[in-house]
Image (cartoon, rainbow, N blue to C red):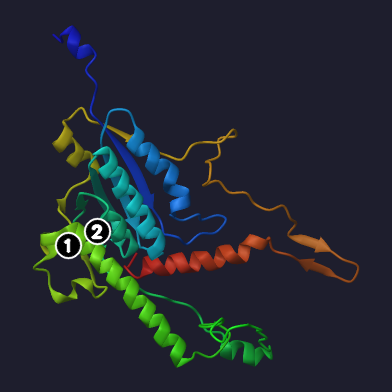
Amino acid sequence: MLSPKSWFKKQPKVAVLRLAGAIGISSPLNPGLSMALLADIIERAFEQKGVKAVALQINSPGGSPVQSSLIAGRIRALSEEKNIPVYAFCEDVAASGGYWLACAADEIYVDESSIIGSIGVVSSSFGFVEAIRKLGVERRVFTAGKNKVSMDAFLPLKEENVNRLKSLQLEIHESFISMVLKRRGEKVADAPEDLFTGEFWTGKRSVELGLVDGISDVRSKMREIFGDDVELELVEPKKGFFGRTKKLGVSLQAGSLLSQNSDNAAINLPSGIAEEMLTAVEVRSLWSRYGL
């Protein structure tokens, strides 16, 4: 029989943050992961009354190194300020910026088949020089400052611009490496040379490399640490008056697919459609790098 004192005993609570999607790649319908969108729920996760830990559920192929750094930095700052441990649980993939987020945790856990790593920097774009030439289109760009326009998709590549881009990538890569070494320390001290080449591995292999701490899932590990009665509370964006998610909600611009003028009928796509399509291609490209 339970004693009266046990009636008032509080269950240990773990706040759960779900970080899923590309980082910093946004459009009207795909906000992505960014500091602006996540700041509120990160703060609320650490402010939960009686919270014993914060668990990150990560499923991300990466994206913006700046947003990755900002998000991870905010999580670490609050963890240290409030003395609350953070545990990361990687799902399908935590690669590149996704792994950067995982490194914000004190311990990282994965599934055996998770894709982990890709500690590197990549820039990708398209070149339309031949396409506009065949279409008879003339590109007109006016600038003040000789380096104001570089890596323009509609202009031929210049070696000096490519070299500058690679120099910037090397600096960002060094920052990424420094962060991993700072967070993982001796766990990656004996790792092979290709650890920081952009290579990626399965969850099982990443344990051996020291990139993560073990194979587990959020429910199992939190019950192991805090007991079977642990309460996992998902922290989500607040809802607006009409039930829409604040900040992450979508507002489509008014407009008609078909408009008439005095000369002919023209089909006008909403202004966000083209942007949405390009974003979808970019995000799909990120996931496909890891066979997903």
Q: Residue at x 30, y 72 (%)?
A: 173
Q: Quadrant of the N terminus?
A: top left
Examine the rendering and report whether any part of residue 281 can be seen: yes
How much space separates mark 2 and mark 1, taking CA atoms? 9 Å
The residue that disc 1 covers is 206
Q: Are marks 2 and 1 in contact (CB under 8 Å)?
A: yes
Residue 197, image quadrant? bottom left
User: Which sits in the foreground, 30 or 266?
Assistant: 30
- Pinpoint residue 58: horizontal percent, then vertical percent: 32, 52
State the image coordinates of residue 245 (x, y, percent, origin top left). 52, 41
Left or right: 127 in relation to 143: left
Is residue 257 shown left or right of residue 93? right
Q: Is residue 78 left or right of residue 211?
A: right
Check residue 114 in the rendering and tell me which mark sits there, or answer none: 2
Residue 186, compared with residue 42, is above or below; it is below
Q: Which part of the image, by quadrant, shows the C terminus?
A: bottom left
Determine the secondary structure under disc 1: helix
Residue sitting at the far right = 262
The residue at 15%/63% (across/down) is: 205
